Image: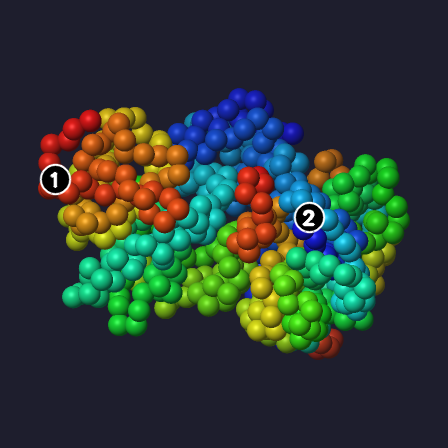
Amino acid sequence: MRAMVIDDSRAMRMILKRIVTKLNFDAVEAGDGQEALNLLADMTEVPDLALIDWNMPNMNGLEFVTNVRADPRLREMTLVMVTTESEQSQIVRALAAGAHEYVIKPFTEGAMIEKLALLGLVPTGANS
Amino acid sequence: MSVEVEVNENDLAEMVEQVWESYLDPEGINPLIPTYDENQPSEVHSSVSITGSWTGHIVYASSTQAARRAAAAFLAMEADEVSQEDLTDVLGELANIVGGNVKAMLPPGAFLSLPQVVLAPESTARFPNTQRISGVYGIWDGEPVSISMWHSRADNNQEVGA
Amino acid sequence: MTLSQSEFSFVSTLVRKEASIVLAPGKEYLVEARLIPVARAVGAANVNEFLAELQRRPNLDYQRKIIDALTTNETSWFRDREPFAALTDVILPELIKSRAATRKVRFWSGASSSGQEAYSLAITLQEALPPGWSYEIVGTDISTEMVKRAETAEYSQVEVNRGLPAAQLVQYFERAGAHWRVTSHLRKNVSFKLMNLTAPLPAMQPFDVVFMRNVLIYFDVATKRTVLQNVAKLLRPDGWLFLGAAETTIGIDDNYERVAAGRTSAYRVRTGVPAGAPRRG
């Protein structure tokens, strides 16, 4: 399984990469929404999962989600926002735009794994 | 505009503790130990500014060593392997995470700036017309770390609270 | 490190005895970090003085503050998921048929702690019951603080990150400062009471479903039997009992039989055995 980690903070990308690698995903990184779309355009196999920050330069996470959901080729990607934006209205906006799940920063590794398990993305027995 | 805001020191302390629990001390063996020492020294600091429905800053400050340790925790490397770029990234992200959570408690219409990181003591920072309204001051692994919240006064005729 | 080994032992013993909190070795710094604000709040000069004062003279308030400061909530919403799936897939459809006359169901969350199980049940019922149906959930706990906390229905950001789908977060919770609070719309169907499961239970209307999960493990066999007998008296004859994943009535109370419930199991009183019949097993 493949995951794309999209955040303008390298440190945050490292944290997320570690978690998805533990869950047997191959991880790909991007620093903003535009870079992520460019990478996706070149991929033959679409990733199963994208973990997406909200506030990024060039294209933010909400715009990225909107673009992905408008593209039939990317239909199978599960989109999870991972962000400090935690107002109720922001979560509603992200879900309405097509994000499947939402994780508020800071998150523990256990919480992230549980969220991914809710989405059926955790191989049984991999829960810590 | 009143200096009082809906984010009190307990709220800030809770947010800071959650950052430790999530990224810096997941095992619960190396927490931030409170000192309440507002004058503790720092060598590096980062901040995010909040504008819109509320104006102010969230500031992270610590020794260089503590900052390296934080970066090491995020990047799963040794403290002495941390580059300046990594350090800047992590300090910015820490201010960003706390700032984002503070923002969610403010009246709607608050905006967060991109983080600024300065490899110099917090005391050199120049935030005009600001007043510290709360702060978490502590020692992490023997090193000083603080996260504080500053409110900008709209004008000098501000009525000053107690 | 200002906490001595004996001070750490004192605190460990206290929280283990009063709140079943186990402090593993290595947590000394965390205990110190958590107790410093507590000591400060009560006006003690430092943690050592605070603990010395408590050892000199028992102080329930100080004790409670310590327990509060050291309680880490490891529970997630819809814990273990399968029992909740069993409700949606198997049990509620059955109850919807069998309770068609009253269109009402009653659930009990035993040892409800901070209330996450009770509110998880409420969300499940809210979503699975047809219009025109009502439900009532009663949570009980032996601790006054836990009952209060469950009634307050406020959870921290990290707590709501655990196992709660975001769509349900925004539907059933609203922000309350740094926390998230269950909406009154959901809270109105959930109540909490103080109760000791091992003592004779107060009269209550019987329940259709009882969640008694990861409670029995704390008791010896005789007490387990007492609790299960007590539960049987409050369970509708065709009602369902859910225990924790590693728990069973088998070998403890033969009045129950284990049945499949979706992908997990539940327990029902054996047919033909009236509630309160002399126990066997």
Callout 2 amino acid: Phe
What residue is shown at x 41% (from left), y 33% (from top)? C20
For the residue pair C174 and A125, the one nearer the viewer reads as: A125
Q: Residue furthest top?
A: C6
Contact between marks 1 and 2 (CB within 8 A): the answer is: no
Q: Residue B112, image x and y in percent?
A: 71, 68
Helix, strand, or loop for circle 2?
Answer: loop
Give the number of callouts.
Answer: 2
For the residue pair B77 and A36, the one nearer the viewer reads as: A36
What residue is shown at x 22% (from left), y 62% (from top)? C97
Callout 1 amino acid: Val
Q: Which residue is mark 2?
A: A25
Is residue A43 toward the left or the right of residue C231 in the image?
right
| Residue C152 visible in this rendered orientation of the protein | no
Q: Residue B53, image x and y in percent?
A: 65, 76
What residue is shown at x 25% (from left), y 62% (from top)? C96
Q: Residue C195, image x and y in percent?
A: 26, 43
Residue C273: mark: 1
Residue C226: mark: none
Callout 2: few (<14), some (14-19), or many (20+) C-alpha neighbours within 10 Å?
Answer: many
Quadrant position of the C terminus of chain B in the picture: bottom right
Q: On what subunit does the disc labeled 1 rest? A: C
Question: How many angstroms separate mark 1 from mark 2 (CA)?
Answer: 52 Å
Helix, strand, or loop for circle 1?
Answer: loop
Quadrant position of the N terminus of chain B in the picture: bottom right
What residue is shown at x 27% (from left), y 53% (from top)? C107
Up-down relation of residue C6 to residue C189 (above or below):
above
